[in-house]
Amino acid sequence: MILLTGATGTVGGLVARRLPIDEPVRLLSRDPARAAALAGPGAEVVGGDFEDPASLRRALTGVRSALLVTANPLTNAHDENFLTAARAAGVGHAVKLTTLSVTEPDATDLITQWQRENERLLRASGLSWTLLRPRAFMSNTLGWARSIRAEGVVRGADGTVATAAIDPRDIADVAVRALMDPAGHAGRAYALTGPAGVTPVQQTEILGELLQRPLKFVELTTDQVLQGLLARCPEPIARALAESAARGRDGSKGQVEPDVAELLGRPGRGYREWATERLAEFG
Ligand SMILES: NC(=O)c1ccc[n+]([C@@H]2O[C@H](COP(=O)([O-])OP(=O)(O)OC[C@H]3O[C@@H](n4cnc5c(N)ncnc54)[C@H](OP(=O)(O)O)[C@@H]3O)[C@@H](O)[C@H]2O)c1
């Protein structure tokens, strides 16, 4: 049995759709009805919350490997609770979604520190583990969809700074391999990037070409970006995201890593391929 946390989210949802049909899979969500609506035929759905250890123990019974996706950078208790329950249930292997910035010594923002500690907890847990460390998801640009539809405009910062953003489908493809073959991926940490650095201005051009209408990129000041983040996120998270963006201005996040191509036997999907698949949301 494979257990997926984050199963209603971006990566977990893609993993659920990619596991072999004959592989027993259980999806954990705080909202099992919603997860059931997304689940493929044959998938088991279980209610569970990282804040509720008893629900985790129930969900992990009979599980051999699990995908661990946590999403609250204000606490490490979610990872801690999950790992305690997993150890008690005899789970063999955990595949953990973390972030590539943990490898960068100058990255000291709250989100990176949170994931560093989550990684430490997993390494100390006694479970065997695989770390998936992605660069920014291409799907973050879905945040532009509303202003593109309404005004043909993308508002963002650092328009000419390249990031080797990754298609979440490639993260999911790697996750499936690690979940299906724990021994082959135990003790490995994968740096997951897209096949090329791409700037927000280039992403805007690609979306305009695909939509067959000109789009305008409007550069925001760092203060405007911070105000936008503060409107959407708790202050410590908004500040961490702004700090991370500032660090990327030296261009280092544009570096392409070989792991995706080596693991999947093909190059990672580019931004044009991702955008083509999701175009209806921008049109
Ligand atoms: N976005 C990026 O650019 C990026 C880059 C690098 C790393 N990451 C990492 O990716 C992870 C997020 O992955 P994602 O984008 O695939 O997730 P997501 O779409 O943000 O979804 C979050 C998932 O977490 C689950 N969740 C939240 N709180 C929970 C709780 N208390 N108990 C149980 N489940 C809970 C939600 O499930 P329910 O609501 O159904 O319970 C949902 O499925 C984070 O760890 C982040 O650091 C993201």
Image (cartoon, rainbow, N blue to C red):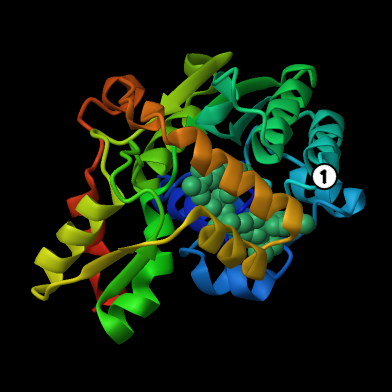
Q: What number of labels is visible?
A: 1
Ligand 1 within 8 angstroms of badge 1 C-beta: no
Above or below, comparing residue 140 to residue 90 in the picture? below
| Secondary structure of residue under mark 1 | loop
Q: The C terminus lies in which quarter of the figure?
A: bottom left
Name the residue rendered at 61%, 33% in the picture.
96
Give the class, few, some or many, for how many residues have Cα within 10 Å of label 1's Cα (few <14, many ≥20).
Answer: few
Name the residue rendered at 59%, 58% in the picture.
226
Above or below, comparing residue 111 to residue 228 in the picture? above
Above or below, comparing residue 74 to residue 226 in the picture? above
Instruction: Give the left or right position of residue 172, taking residue 98 as reference.
Output: left
Give the x, y percent position of residue 236: 75, 51
The answer to whether residue 28 of the structure is visible from this angle is: no
Seen from the viewer's position, the closer of residues 263 and 32 is 263
Considering every residue shown, the one lying at the far bottom of the view is 150
Q: Residue 55 falls in which quadrant of the image?
A: bottom right
Name the residue rendered at 72%, 18% in the picture.
123
Instruction: Give the left or right position of residue 82, taking residue 282 as reference.
Output: right
Seen from the viewer's position, the closer of residues 55 and 41 is 55
Seen from the viewer's position, the closer of residues 175 and 207 is 207
Seen from the viewer's position, the closer of residues 85 and 2 is 85
Residue identified by numbered label 1: 75
Give the x, y percent position of residue 138: 36, 51
Q: Given the image, on which type of amino acid does mark 1 rest? A: Thr
The answer to whether residue 163 of the structure is visible from this angle is: yes
Give the x, y percent position of residue 215: 19, 71
